[in-house]
Amino acid sequence: MKPLFSPQILKGVWMLLGILLVVKMLWFAVELLWLPTAGVQHSEAKGPKALYYRVKLSPSEAPAPTAQQKPLETAGSIKDITLLAIYNASDTTVVTIEHKRKTKVLSKGEAINGFVLEGAGNDYATFSKDAKTYKVDLMIKTKGAAGIKSVTPSSAGTPSSEVEGNVIDAGDYKIVDKSLVQHYAKNMDDIYKNIGITEVKKGNVLEGFRVTFIRKGSPFEKLGMKRGDVIKAINGQKIDNYNVAFDIYKNIENIDNLTLVIERGKEEMELEYEVN
């Protein structure tokens, strides 16, 4: 019997299959090592990658813009201050003002309602606040020495408010009702309506205050002072500057005993008072 395939043909087929297998294996190796796994120039991302999300907020969800805070308005106005009296010297400035129906004495540098007294002229005072300067005119312009407001006897009239209290003569001293002291401590303008004073200087040195008039029947007349008296010292403190006099005035409600050293003519004497 003759075989279907000759040994040479079978040998050729097996050789061909072997060649194809080798080529396939080589192609697989090339594809694995150099060619991209899929598509053109595909590269696999390596390592972790951060995720970002775009979120679109609706108008109602959008954060409200930060409101710009307005500076708080400072309470009070320069119009609340009424200028009643002025003393203005080369080294001292003292004014009497009325604020909310209360009288107060201010020295240069002191403040009322946030307004600082900077200086004064003959009929005005200047105040500062928040880097701004304000001018306040004297309410009643009257003639007086050294720029201080004074009232002459003919224009004095009667005090603006009823004065309570009395002065009692106890011989060597006088007893003054505390209510009387409290009244004049809060109503300095009434002082000018009952008594007039002017400065006494020796050269440029202040030596005291001279009484220029005393209203008849007023508590000041009952204190025993007379026209022409020079007040030299108060409670042992020489009146050699205005700060001494006005410091005593500002604390007058806390004083129980008061001693005035006065010069009457060529004689020096003491006036004693007890406040109760």
Image (cartoon, grey):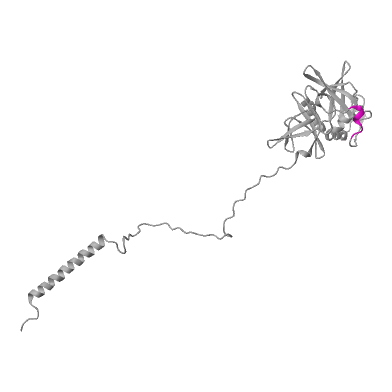
Q: Is residue 58 above or below residue 228?
A: below
Q: Position of residue 194 (x, y in %)?
A: 89, 29
Residue found at the very far front of the displayed protein? 40
Res 179 seen here: yes
Res 276 seen here: no
- Seen from the viewer's position, the closer of residues 237 and 150 is 150
Q: Is residue 136 in the magenta section?
A: no
Quarter of the figure that contains the N terminus: bottom left
Q: Is residue 156 in the magenta section?
A: yes
- Seen from the viewer's position, the closer of residues 6 and 100 is 6
Q: Is residue 114 above or below residue 242?
A: below
- Seen from the viewer's position, the closer of residues 169 and 43 is 43
Q: Position of residue 276 (x, y in %)?
A: 87, 33
- Which image quarter: residue 265? top right
Q: Is residue 138 above or below residue 25?
A: above
Residue found at the very far right of the displayed protein? 217
| Image: magenta residue range | 152-159
- Which image quarter: residue 272? top right
Residue 241 located left or right of residue 15? right
Residue 38 located left or right of residue 144? left
Residue found at the very far bottom of the displayed protein? 1
Residue beneath the point at 13% across and 72% down: 14
